[in-house]
Image (cartoon, helix red, strand yellow):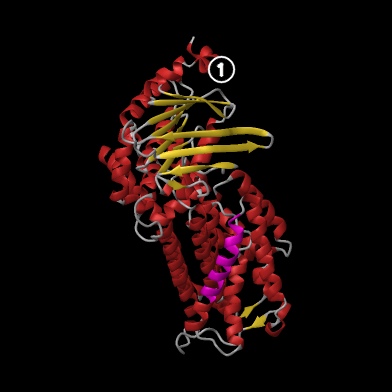
């Protein structure tokens, strides 16, 4: 068996008296798309925040590429190839679309403590950034200030930023949140073309997207993993159907 | 016609971007030629002060305008640079080969030591803690009894360069200050457009995003803080030579506030605005205080007007006027 890229072991987190992550164990294999679904308030974003390092867990371990990263700062995890997108769009609004992505290329290539030379004309940063933008269909919008993009385009930009990091693992927190039908389909197509290139953890509400893309699904309810398996297994799991999927699939 | 409209906006924008600083420095360069008409010493002294404070304002703009780090203690760095000249001078060391590096290093070290603490905080807390460190420096200077304490310290001899009396005349001091301002301006311009500058500007926009793509935000802010501190020290070095006097008042929180006003008045995050703001502030102060000793009664409401109606400062007003002119 191949070693997992990411392994989360017995993770736990409390917000005051509320247990938001309850003994969560899951892993992500190379090339796998592992979806995490669950109703609102199930603790999906909290889980992603702990994996990416925005929150630190109360108990448990996070192993990334075999290394224990549980106590590492967010930027250090990113430096090791852990990229994430946010449920609530998180971009640099006054930077151009290209600059947003070029900054991500920059983060993994060469020094940042260079005080001379115009960064805006550095082809070594701009070319990979343009390539990432082309992959998500934003190639023609490169010069626009990111704050002026439509909501769907911002979601695509988030994805392009994550791609430009050439991550070893992609954590996607509801990449389709709030997008229209057309945009959702475009994003699904973009994700499908990325499948296999990067292992991904996908948190998503859109069940069509999840069942279309995922290799494995974990169902999170009240901070606990209720079930984990292939889409077919999860769909057939009686506990999942009663607790969550029932109303979604009818 | 279509060619001009479509092909050259980028080049035209760059040209327009350089026209203003060129004009500013041209004015500074020719002032001494015309200063003779109306009390040369007075005019040169005033404009030298403008340029010296413009250096400190540039440094502060680097923090406030480009990094959203609202420092309310930036006058401390001016004071440190000035005291380096004063204290060394009191011990008979007036050569700038020693005094200038000491002024820069001391203010950079102070920025590093305080920045480590200040930059752990954000927003209002950052303002408060930079203010606190500024006041600490102020009270420390006030208690330096051997160096004049509250009364300050007269500098008996302006700095020399390897024994050569580089500041022998006000005109020489003027041009050295102009060179220093030009150097500081070019450094800041290059810095904000560099690799470092993009990351640093990014920390203003969205620090969380920067961290998630792998940048340790704090380190970039600290480097900028140290650079801004050293530029403050440069300003202080020149100020001590221009005034031939140093006093704790250089570090007072009112001074820090005035520096912030200069930056905001001129237009934050533009560098040009910092220079224009410093000039506007000091010249208005000079002019209004000639009219009445209660000049702040006029100056205060003027600031309020700018803050309310021109959030982009004087440069913002200028840009808006030009847009109206074109339409």
Q: Is residue B118 found inside the magenta-colored segment of the image?
A: yes
Q: Is residue A24 found inside the magenta-colored segment of the image?
A: no
Q: Nearer the viewer, residue B205 or A224?
A: A224
Quarter residue A21 falls in: top right
Quarter residue B299 falls in: bottom right
Quarter of the image where the C terminus of chain B is located: top left
Q: Position of residue B232 (x, y in %)?
A: 55, 68
Does any portion of residue B144 appear in the rendered image? yes
Most distant residue in the top direction: A250
Q: In the figure, A229 relative to B146: above or below?
A: above
Q: In the figure, B284 relative to B303: above or below?
A: below
Q: In the figure, B26 relative to A88: above or below?
A: below
Residue at the spot 57% in from the left edge and 71% down from the top edge: B46
Q: How many numbered markers are drawn?
A: 1
> What is the secondary structure assignment of the residue under circle 1?
helix
Q: Position of residue A221 (x, y in %)?
A: 56, 25
Prevailing SS of the magenta stretch: helix
Does any portion of residue B290 appear in the rendered image? no
Q: In the figure, A97 relative to B288: above or below?
A: above
Q: Please name the residue that numbered disc 1 is placed on.
A: A243
* Left/right of residue B25 with respect to residue B102 in the rendered view: left
Residue at the spot 35% in from the left edge and 46% down from the top edge: A105
Q: Nearer the viewer, residue A20 or B71?
A: A20
Range shown magenta: B103-120
Chain letter for mark 1: A
């Amino acid at each position: 068996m191949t070693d997992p890229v990411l392994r989360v072991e017995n993770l736990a987190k409390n917000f005051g008296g509320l247990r938001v992550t309850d003994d969560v164990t899951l892993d992500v294999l190379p090339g796998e798309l592992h979806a995490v679904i669950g109703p609102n308030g199930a603790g999906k974003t909290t889980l992603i925040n702990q994996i990416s390092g925005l929150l630190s867990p109360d108990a448990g371990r996070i192993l990334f590429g075999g290394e224990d990263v549980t106590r590492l700062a967010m930027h250090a995890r990113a430096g090791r190839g852990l990229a994430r997108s946010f449920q609530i769009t998180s971009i640099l609004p006054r930077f151009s679309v290209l600059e947003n992505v070029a900054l991500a290329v920059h983060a993994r290539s060469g020094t940042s403590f260079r005080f001379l030379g115009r960064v805006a004309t550095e082809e070594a940063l701009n070319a990979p950034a343009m390539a990432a933008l082309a992959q998500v269909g934003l190639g023609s919008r490169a010069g626009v200030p990111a704050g002026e993009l439509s909501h769907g385009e911002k979601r695509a930009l988030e994805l392009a930023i994550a791609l430009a990091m050439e991550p070893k693992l992609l954590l996607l927190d509801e990449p389709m949140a709030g997008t229209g039908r057309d945009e959702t389909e475009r994003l699904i197509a973009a994700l499908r073309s990325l499948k296999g290139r990067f292992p991904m953890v996908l948190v998503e509400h859109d069940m069509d997207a999840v069942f279309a893309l995922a290799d494995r699904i974990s169902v999170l309810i009240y901070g606990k993993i209720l079930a984990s398996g292939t889409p077919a297994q999860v769909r057939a799991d009686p506990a999942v159907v009663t607790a969550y999927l029932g109303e979604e699939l009818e | 016609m279509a060619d001009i409209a479509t092909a050259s906006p980028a080049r035209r924008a760059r040209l327009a971007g350089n026209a203003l600083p060129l004009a500013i420095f041209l004015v500074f360069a020719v002032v001494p030629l015309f200063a003779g008409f109306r009390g040369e010493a007075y005019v040169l002294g005033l404009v030298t002060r403008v340029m010296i404070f413009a250096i400190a304002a540039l440094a502060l703009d680097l923090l406030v305008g480009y990094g959203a780090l609202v420092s309310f203690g930036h006058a401390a760095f001016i004071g440190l640079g000035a005291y380096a000249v004063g204290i060394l001078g009191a011990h008979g060391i007036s050569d700038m080969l020693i005094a200038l590096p000491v002024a820069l290093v001391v203010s950079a070290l102070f920025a590093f030591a305080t920045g480590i603490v200040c930059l752990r905080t954000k927003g209002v807390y950052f303002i408060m803690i930079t203010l606190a460190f500024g006041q600490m420096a102020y009270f420390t200077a006030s208690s330096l009894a051997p160096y004049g304490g509250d009364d300050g310290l007269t500098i008996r001899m302006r700095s020399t360069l390897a024994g050569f009396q580089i500041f022998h005349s006000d005109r020489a001091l003027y041009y050295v200050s102009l060179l220093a301002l030009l150097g500081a301006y070019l450094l800041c311009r290059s810095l904000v457009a560099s690799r470092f500058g993009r990351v640093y500007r990014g920390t203003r926009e969205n620090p969380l995003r920067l961290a998630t793509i792998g940048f340790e935000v704090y380190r970039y802010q600290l480097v900028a803080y140290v650079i801004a501190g050293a530029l403050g020290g440069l300003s202080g070095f020149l100020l001590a030579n221009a005034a031939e006097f140093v006093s704790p008042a250089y570090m007072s929180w009112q001074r820090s506030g005035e520096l912030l006003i200069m930056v905001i008045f001129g237009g934050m995050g533009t560098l040009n605005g910092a220079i224009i703001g410093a000039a506007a502030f000091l010249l208005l102060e000079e002019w209004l205080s000639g009219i009445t000793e209660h000049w702040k009664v006029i100056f205060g409401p003027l600031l309020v007007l700018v803050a309310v109606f021109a959030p982009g400062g004087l440069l913002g007003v200028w840009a808006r006027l030009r847009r109206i002119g074109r339409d």
